[in-house]
Amino acid sequence: MQIGKVRGSTPFKCTIGQAQIAQLDRASRLQIGKVRGSTPFKCTKNFRPFCTVPKGLLNFNQQLYMLNLVLFGPPGAGKGTQSKNLIDKYGLIHLSTGDLLRGEIAEGTELGLEAKKLMDDGKLVPDAVVIGMISHKLDANKTAKGFIFDGFPRTVVQAEELDELLNSKGAPICCMIALEVNDNELEHRLLLRGKDSGRADDANPEVIRKRIKEYNDKTAPVADFYKGQNKFNSINGIGSVGEIFASICTIVDKYLK
């Protein structure tokens, strides 16, 4: 990766191999850059730099910087509320594997039909199928400002496969944000939620404790995976919605500078 700089602005990240960096002066809106051994590409200065590069060089063929983040948190941590806030402020697309599965099945796609057959047989949908659905979603939204990955990855293998997919598209994960809430508070929140939602899994304290334990056991290695990449960020998930969101924005804004 190289760091490019639009003269008079903050640096931007360039992941186009060994691309030479095109410089733009304040008065210029367009400059021709050159990728060694290839045809020229155009760099335009907008809210963020964009590039149109030779086909195959940047598979996603879109803006150089996409804000992709993983939002983590146990049941009751407030991921749904904060995801909506992030979407409203930053224009991101919410990507939930559950929604993806339902969408692919409803559209009758090849991956959706494969997933439905497995689910009907009581089997888990393989990671490869889920990754394929994520790839379809990304390709269908090539001009997106970024994505919030909610509930995925859940394992280190999934995190590795997601990295491979996103890196191949020149749009890697920028950061992981984990909402930290103690178990007693989570149980209290879920029991209150259960009174309103009527969900059985939010009404039984024993079931709630098992869900929280399963989350903690399964996701701890994934947190370590992102810590190893210096992408892990922990947020105190106790406080007002506004206070928690302000803490999240402080982290997100660092990746927009």
Image (cartoon, rainbow, N blue to C red):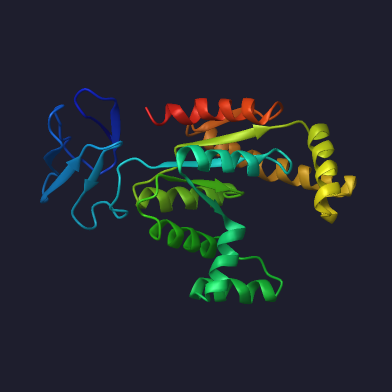
In the image, 44 versus 101, the foreground residue is 44
Tell me where residue 79 appears, x and y as whole percent.
64, 41
Q: Residue 5: name its quadrant.
A: top left
Q: Horizontal placement of 174 versus 248: left or right?
A: left
Count of numbered tags: 0
Q: Residue 216: name its quadrant.
A: top right
In the image, 185 versus 224, the foreground residue is 185
Q: Quadrant of the C terminus?
A: top left
Q: Eyeballing the image, is 167 above or below 24? A: below
Q: Eyeballing the image, is 31 above or below 104? A: above
Residue at 30% x, 37% y is 48
Residue at 64% x, 44% y is 80
Q: Residue 219: name its quadrant.
A: top right
Q: Quadrant of the N terminus?
A: top left
Tell me where residue 225 appears, x and y as whole percent.
54, 38
Tell me where residue 95 appears, x and y as whole percent.
53, 52
Tell me where residue 246 appears, x and y as whole percent.
57, 26
In the image, 113 versus 50, the foreground residue is 50
